[in-house]
Image (tube, rainbow, N blue to C red):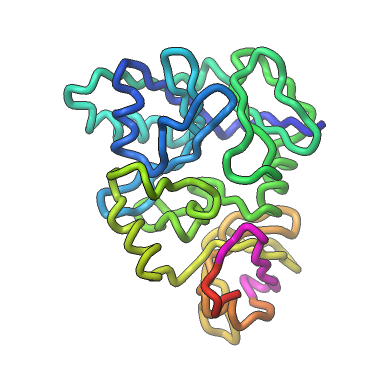
Amino acid sequence: MPIAHLTGRGVVEVTGPDRVAFLQGLVSNDIAAAGPGRAVWAALLTPQGKWLADFFVMAEAERLLLDVEAAQAGMLIQRLARFRLRAKVSLRDASAEFAVMAGWGDSVPPAGTLAAPDPRLPEAGWRCLSPVGPAADAEEAEWDLHRLRLGLPDGSRDLEPEKSVLLEGGFDELGGVSWTKGCYMGQELTARTKYRGLLKRRIVPVTVEGGLPPRGTPVLRDGVEVGEMRSARDGHGLALLRLDVLAAGGALSAGGAVLTPRVPGWMKLPAAAE
C-alpha cells in the first residue's frame, strides 16, 4: 500500500465568496468541477500562454486548497493577487498546516484527510492533504519513479516558466485544460496551438542506459540537437523531443547515456509522429 509524503509540495488557500469565479477567469481548467472527492488539475499561464505553475485544486467547505510546488507558492499568491481587484477573495500560504501525500496501487487515503483521485490518470492513484502527520509507508523517490514511468510532468522539473506551452506537457490528454469553460489568461495561444496543429515538441518518457543526464542536457541524434533532458531517476526520465524525431524512432544520446523514447498509451500524437 504505497503512500508517500511529498515534501516538495505546499498548499495555497483561497477563500471568499468569489473564490471560484476568481480562479475560473485566470487558470486553464474548470474550477467549478472541484468538489468532494474530485480534484481539478490546472495551470496558471502568462498572458502570452506560457506556463508559470500548475496545481491540484481541492474544495473544502468555504475554501479552495491548491496543492502546488512549495517553491512556487509565494509566486502563485503574488501573481493571483494582481488580479484580485474588487473580487471578494483572500489568498494565503497554508503549507505549514498540511502534509501533501500521494498514494497508488491498492492504497487508500488515511482517515481525516482531504483526498481525491489524481485527475490525470487512474494509474496515478490519489492525492490528499493531511492536517495531521503523514502516514507514509513509501519513500518520495518511489512516487517520483512511478510518475516518471507514467510520463507525468512534475512542475518546474519538467516545464520552463514563461517558455513551455501546456500541450507540450500533456495537459490536453491529462485533463489539465477545459476547452469549453470560456476565457482565461493565456487561452488564445493554448487554443491556437491545439486547433492549428502548431505543436512541434512533446515531453515524453525515456529509458536511460548509462549515467543519468542532468536536467537541461541536450539530446542528440547523430550529433544534431533534437531535444533536452528533463527530470530522471533510476533509469527512467522525461525528455522534451521534437515530434519528427519521435516519428523516426530509434535511440538518442544525452551526456554519454543512450535514451530510448517511449510514447505512453494516453498520449495522442499527430499520425506522422506515432
Where on the picture, by quarter, is residue 79? Answer: top left
Front residue of 237/83: it is 83
Q: Which residue is rendered at x = 22% and y = 22% of the image? A: 87
Magenta-drawn segment: 253-268
- Coordinates of residue 179 in the picture (x, y in percent): 39, 50
Q: Which residue is rendered at x = 29% and y = 29% of the image? A: 22
- Left or right, 189 with respect to 128, comes to left
Where on the picture, by quarter, is residue 81? Answer: top left
Residue 217 in view of the camera = no
The verdict on residue 254 being magenta is yes
**In the image, is residue 236 above or below residue 97?**
below
- Left or right, 98 with respect to 262, comes to left
- Coordinates of residue 35 in the picture (x, y in percent): 51, 25
How many numbered marks are there? Answer: 0
Q: Which residue is rendered at x = 23% and y = 27% of the image? A: 84
Where on the picture, by quarter, is residue 73? Answer: top left
- Coordinates of residue 247 in the picture (x, y in percent): 59, 79
**In the image, is residue 94 above or below residue 30?**
above
Front residue of 2/183: it is 183
Where the C terminus falls, by quadrant?
Answer: bottom right
